[in-house]
Image (cartoon, rainbow, N blue to C red):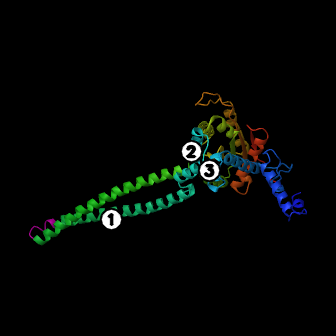
Amino acid sequence: MREAALQSPGNGTQQGIADRLARWANRLSAKAEDPVEEPASARTPAGKTFSREVDRRRQLYQDIGAFLFAHDLDLTPLNFGVAQDYLTGNDHGIEKAVAAVLAERGKITNGWVESVVANGPNKDVSADTLHEMLNKVENNLTQITGIVVESRDSAKDYGAALQEQVRDLSEEAKAEPVLARLIGLTRTMVEKTRQVEAQMRDSAKQTKALQQSLETARRAAEQDHLTGLPNRRAFEATLTAETLKAQNDREPISVAFCDIDHFKLVNDTHGHETGDRVLKFVSGLLAKISGDKCHVARHGGEEFVMLFRGKTASEACELVDAARADLATRNLVNRSTGERMDRITFSAGVANVLAYDDPRAALKAADRALYLAKEHGRNRVYLAAEVEP
């Protein structure tokens, strides 16, 4: 159908161009439930289309456009970026700032967007960039520490040698004024050497404290600021390392992708502060499963990922489903208003990591299983097929 449309008469005319633009506009404005044609490679043997990413992007475009239109904002990259950060929760600072202004004034302006971005943190320093900077600083500190320790030991050895020579010469110097002065100078040098040694010792302590501070900074760069869980970057590094361990030890390893159901509705109904508390609550439930071989992280927004080394996909599915069932029985209340909230649930997909050539491919398979769980009613856990079409 697409090829026929592109080759139809009049495509080179103004009317043909207008028709094509109209068709594209209709596609972009279509509802999220409308079917989307996708390549055969994205379908299951039964012909089921996985359109989660397409639906998600299309819905995001619609939400951003509606946001800009509602606030009469110019269609600029700056405004588009702020709208995206607010709607997706990619930038917690922007999300909080916009929510505060909306609560106070009900509307934001072009000037406010410019000011909040200008006064915000430098986004050029990403988590990856910060991690590289910390690595370089730590490497330099390691070299400095070695130099300090070596210098301190040398000063200590030199001072001990001088002190021994002073003792040997003391008796012989009683009748020799010149030698006595030389010994006096040597004793002065011994004292200065001791001072240098003490300074070197203090420098070594300060360097060690700085290294500990850098390690704290590195952990902060790999931690989600809201939930305290590892972030996406930290999880991807763990996924690679744990997969290698599992392969070497011939252990099973599985990955799960979890997504809170209708989370945007929680924010829209109860506010972002309540939404944040829901995220923390869900992260706490998932973190209970965490251990030496189970890792839980916030992937972004309302999405969480879990890695199970030593667990088959079926065993991991049972653990995730137990957490899902636990959450579904909780009766949560809006702390600000005392109002009982609708039941909070999540959907999940689980995949066998070793069934795929790459750990990220397994994560994508778990994401596709999650999409099916969402499509078939939410509040359920699906196991990904190990043979992809």
Q: Measure how far apart labels 3 and 2 are at the Cα level.
A: 10 Å
How packed mark 3 is, by other alpha carbons closer than 10 Å (few <14, some 14-19, many 20 or more), is many
Is residue 305 shown above or below 203? above
Quarter that holds the C terminus: bottom right
Q: Earlier in the sequence, mark 1 or mark 3?
A: 3
Q: Please indicate, yes or no, whether residue 294 appears anywhere in the rendered image.
A: no
The answer to whether residue 340 is above or below residue 318 is above
Disc number lying in front (1 or 3)? 3
In front: mark 2 or mark 1?
2
Q: Give the residue pinned by disc 2.
A: 97
Q: Is residue 31 left or right of residue 116?
A: right
Q: Amino acid at mark 3?
A: Val
- State the residue at coordinates (78%, 38%): 377
Residue 111 screen position, x and y as percent: 57, 50
Residue 369 position within the rendered picture, expressed as x and y whole percent measured from the top left:
76, 46
Magenta residue span: 169-175
Q: Quadrant of residue 190?
A: bottom left
Image x and y of residue 348, in percent:
71, 42
Q: Is residue 151 above or below residue 269?
A: below
Residue 112 magenta-highlighted:
no
Please tell me which residue is depicted at 58% across the width and 40% down the height of the picture.
Answer: 105
Quadrant the N terminus occupies: bottom right
- The image quarter containing residue 260 is top right
Type of the residue with mark 2? Ala
Q: Which residue is mark 1?
A: 154
Provide the residue designation for mark 3: 82
